[in-house]
Image (cartoon, rainbow, N blue to C red):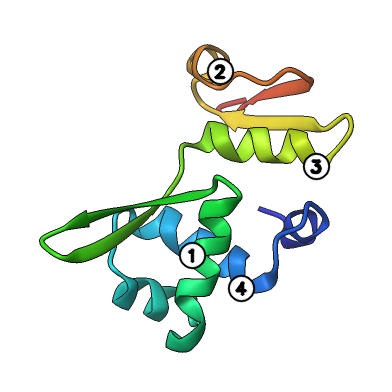
Amino acid sequence: MNIAVLKRIGLTESEIKVYFALMKLGLSSTGPIIKESTINHSKIYFVLKKLEDKGLASHVIKSNTTYYQSSDPANFLEYIQSKIDVPTFFFFSDDIAWVKENIKVENNSYYIDWNS
C-alpha cells in the first residue's frame, strides 16, 4: 500500500505503522503492537485512540486486558471516500467475483485478475 496516499488522506506515519501492525497481528494487546509497529510505549494508546476515532480500529476487553484490532476493510474504504472527492480503487485479486460481492464501493473501481 502506498504510504504517501495514506498520508494524503490524513493518517500520520505513526497511525500508518500501527494500522499495518494491526492488520498483520489481528486481535492483539499493546505489547505485540508496539514491537511490530516500533511505536514508543508512551505514544501507543494515543495512536490507537486516534485510529479508533477514525473508525479504523476497535478494541475489546477480556480478563482485564485490552485487545485491539483493525476494523473491517469496508471502514477503511469509507474513510478514503470521506477524504477524497472522487477516489478510484484498483482491486487485485485471484477471485474477482468475491471482491465484487464483498467489497462495496460507490466510486470508480477497477478489478485486476491476479492470475492474468
Q: Name the residue under label 4.
A: 14
Q: Mark 2 points at which residue?
A: 96
> Which of marks 3 and 2 precedes in the sequence?
3
Q: Which amino acid does label 1 sit on?
A: Leu
Q: Mark 3 points at which residue?
A: 83
Q: Name the residue at the left extreme.
A: 63
Cα–Cα span, label 2 and label 3: 26 Å
Residue 48: give its label.
1
The answer for how far apart the CA atoms under marks 1 and 3 are is 20 Å
* 107 lies left or right of 18: right
Spatial CA span between label 4 and label 1: 10 Å
Which one is earlier in the sequence, the residue at label 2 or at label 1?
1
The mark that comes first in sequence, 1 or 3, is 1
Q: How crowded is mark 4: few (under 14 residues within 10 Å), some or many (20 or more)?
A: some
Q: Which amino acid does label 2 sit on?
A: Ile
Mark 2 or 4, which is nearer the eye? Answer: 4
Q: Which of 44 and 97 is in front in this view?
A: 44
Q: Residue at x 55, y 31 (%)?
A: 74
